[in-house]
Amino acid sequence: MTRNQLLLLGLGASLALQPAMAQQKATTKPATVTKAPTATAGGARLVEKVTRKGSELVIPYEKYVLPNGLTVIVAEDHSDPLVHVDVTYHVGSAREQIGKSGFAHFFEHMMFQGSDHVADEQHFKTVSAAGGTLNGSTNRDRTNYFETVPSNQLETALWLEADRMGFLLDAVTQPKFENQRSTVKNERGQNYDNRPYGLASENVSRTLYPYGHPYSWMTIGYLEDLDRSNVDDLKNFFLRWYGPNNATLTVGGDVKPADVIRLAEKYFGPIAKGPAVTAQKLPAPKLTQDRYVSYKDNVRFPMLQMVFPTVPSGHPDEFALDALADIIGSGKNSLLYKNLTKTQQAVQAQAYNSTSELAGEFTVVALPFPGKGLDSLEIKVRNTFKEFERTGATAEQVGRYKASTEAQMINGLASVQGKVSQLAANQTYFGNPNRLPEELKQLRAVTPADVNRVYNQYIKGKSAVVLSVVPKNGSVPPVKADNYTVSKEGYKAPDYGYNGLKYVKATDTFDRSKQPAAGTNPVVQVPAVWQASFDNGLRLMGTRNAEIPTVTMLLTIRGGHRLEQSMPNKAGIASLTASMMNEGTQKYTGEQFSAELEKLGSSIRVNTGDDNTTVYVQSLTKNLPATMKLLEERLMRPRFDEADFARIKKQTLEGIANQSTQPVVIADKTFARLVYGAGDIMQVAGSGTTSTVTNLTLDDVKQFYQQNYAPNVSYLVAVGDVDQAALTNQAGFLKSWQKKDVSLPAGMASTQPDKTRIYFVNKDGAAQSEIRVGYLTPLTYDATGDYYRAYLSNYLLGGAFNSRINLNLREDKGYTYGARSGFQGTRYVGPYTAQAGVRADATAASVKEFMKEIQGYRNGISDDELQFLQASVGQSDALRYETGQQKALFLSRLLEYDLPTSYVQQQSDILKNLKKEDVQGIAQKYLPADNMYIVVVGDRAKSFPGLSELGYEVVELDADGNRLTAMAPAAPAATSTLTPPLDAEKMKVKTKDADGKKEKRKSKKDKDDAK
């Protein structure tokens, strides 16, 4: 299946896009569908209404079609005071042609550059000021744009989307075109050309598909094609594919269908219908022999990738192929794990089946440990296929796959965005939003015989593309010599009908230039909670939410990486212990434990961080008792097997060694070494160092577990379809957890540098420079004191997309894909950090702009900025408590910092009463005019020039933090002669709010979802 899109949304694999023919006749609907061929006064025709009967897995909705062909789907859901708006256009890179690749993604960028009634960048500012989030994405088969906003902002969201559908082209100027062409080029350079394995998909696609097939190139396209494009090409693309009749508007959340349809008729109804769009049909690729191809990359681990052509989405064999991939290469019970990963032949090995609208691909990927060849790896993979031929699929294997996939389907309905995404995708590709029950029926029908049949039909004895990605140093040769060259024979360019297209604007009976007024702010209900405690000191908190039959739990054990303060020679032990906790128990091997979880469709994962170790639990309500039994096994009776330890330790050491190949990691580690004082364990990464991890033993792990996993430094939160009595009863085993004398370390005192210096680390061949600016603040977390006020102050400087730092470095100067800053603090003091990855030739100029913005912020903010801050942060609460995970994190924060639930209202009061002078005071207090660490990691030849002209001492370090030479500072230059690079691309900027929650503030990037 096409998994990537929904995994990005956190919805689970089985709820992925199901592309097929847009005009394909809808399959038979279940009894929940009511046909209703009626029309509103505005001409919108109600096509069908779907309701839930009993406990069936279905998303209720109403489906309408406007006279101009726009399909409108409304999913009414009043569980949270928010609304998600999605506009999906049935056009992706599959509607491109040779010589003009990348247009679909390029146009996605242009859709964010303003329209007749919405100024450039105003779309982002409007949604952010409303407390919402937004994004856009392109894949092979569709492009979509979406916002999640408080429910009182519904009309504004529709106004924004309609304006760029019907009033875009006059706002497309040559400067904007050039700006975004450069942006897309920069994106390709950063995310593909210069990323390890980034060109694997491109090499596979052009080898697997015939010349001219629209899947033979990546969604991002080729640079030379972008160079050949012009404004007229782009305008024609819009006129051909962006008509309302090729789009689906899906709205879900705290809305009433009648209101949505009325507004859709008002804003979208006057937009003229576009040219007709017919379904594409192309034959599946046929390979007469294995096609071996290879390329060199800057990687530590070589990679083998084998790709077999299979079936498009919606094909009857899709679920059986998914099950086959699961058995061969997904999880600890897969054959590839048994044969390659567990035996330490490969760092990782997996198989997956991906589908798009026109074709499907069954893929195996394996990365051997250094020193092992790809030729022997290919033999092992092929022997794994032969092993499957001998054993075939078993009922137990297929049953585990079906149970875990069905649970993912249910979990995928936790958010309004997840529901809307399902409806939009199924309408776009199948003409049937209500495809979820049908998918569930197909899933449940899969048998071992089906899985064996599809293996014989699509894999056994069939040819594949075999890609070798080998290190540039030539240490590992490809599997075999390349034996395939693309042939242009028989290619005929498609005629998509671009001739004679005309731009006709809608005629309105209202003033579209006026932004709609927002409704009354929704009342956000903080979850009602219950609390309890056990005699051993364990605290419990929960909230009941019966929206879907699932339960999310989070057990937090204080300590984490900071416990290593007293044993720095064992740095990495907390992380290694957590990894071992994810293996076997006294009752089950790691494989058996994984199998038991899969049977239930449950998850139990142990992770460690700087301050805590956490145990995340996800379960269907009906399987909660069995899941809790497994939690008891994992937490109370870990296996700590010697063979597991040897394997995980080896993988950890390889991971540490691989960090030195990544400029981002080098920058983070260098910054930590400088910011934290001598002797502070936070100078060392949580994974440890090569020397410390090398010396760790299994006895060290056992001792760390015995001494530091204790109930009196822990708390458990539970959210979902379970009440207090049932949960506390099922968690009763935790009462026998023995209390221990755990010594949590005190934090080290924060110190500032005596003056600002630049610390430069050379990384040969780095296409970008990584910059970190900051110092260790005296701030620890508090909900209503200076830490919260510092968060508010920084929001305008570097916390929001429209922050000063990001608008300067990215939007104005075009130096970066995204720049941000923020304060970090827990029970321990944390750093203030401003950071970005920038174009190499703009390194010195970027440092200069960072320092200018940070120092200039001390001078105060404007009235408009204060208004934006109060509106954006103040209205964002509607989006904070929607999913089980969000609620669990909220409850965990209450227990971690002993907060009352009323702190949310206290924060609101602080925000409402905030003055410009308050923001300035915090900036002057916590943003020193000098005394900052500046870290730069980049290619010396490209990034170093100009740094000494900024007036700071420049100190050169190696990747391990050792000082090389210190250069005397040059006098500050009166003016900068650095040439600004071309504009960079819009990215998803992730920030942390005052509660430590990550949130997406704005994005605009290509997601090749079918990759």
Image (spheres, grey):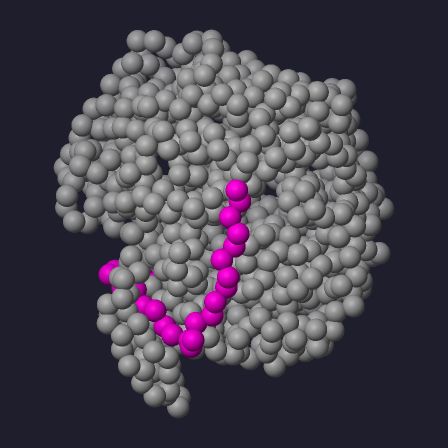
> Which residues lie in the magenta part?
743-768
In this rendering, position of residue 146 left or right of residue 756 = right
Residue 20 in sight from this viewpoint = no
Residue displayed at 60% across by 76% down: 924
Q: Position of residue 352 (x, y in %)?
A: 40, 29
Against 389, residue 330 (above or below) is below
**Residue 757 covered by magenta stretch:** yes
Residue 807 in sight from this viewpoint = yes
**Front-most of 873 and 792?**
792
Q: Write down the quadrant of residue 677 in the picture.
A: bottom left
Q: Write down the quadrant of residue 10 in the picture.
A: top right
Residue displayed at 21% across by 38% down: 370
Quarter of the image with the C terminus in it: top left
Residue displayed at 51% across by 17% down: 596
**Residue 855 covered by magenta stretch:** no
Against 744, residue 806 (above or below) is below
Q: Position of residue 450 (x, y in %)?
A: 45, 12
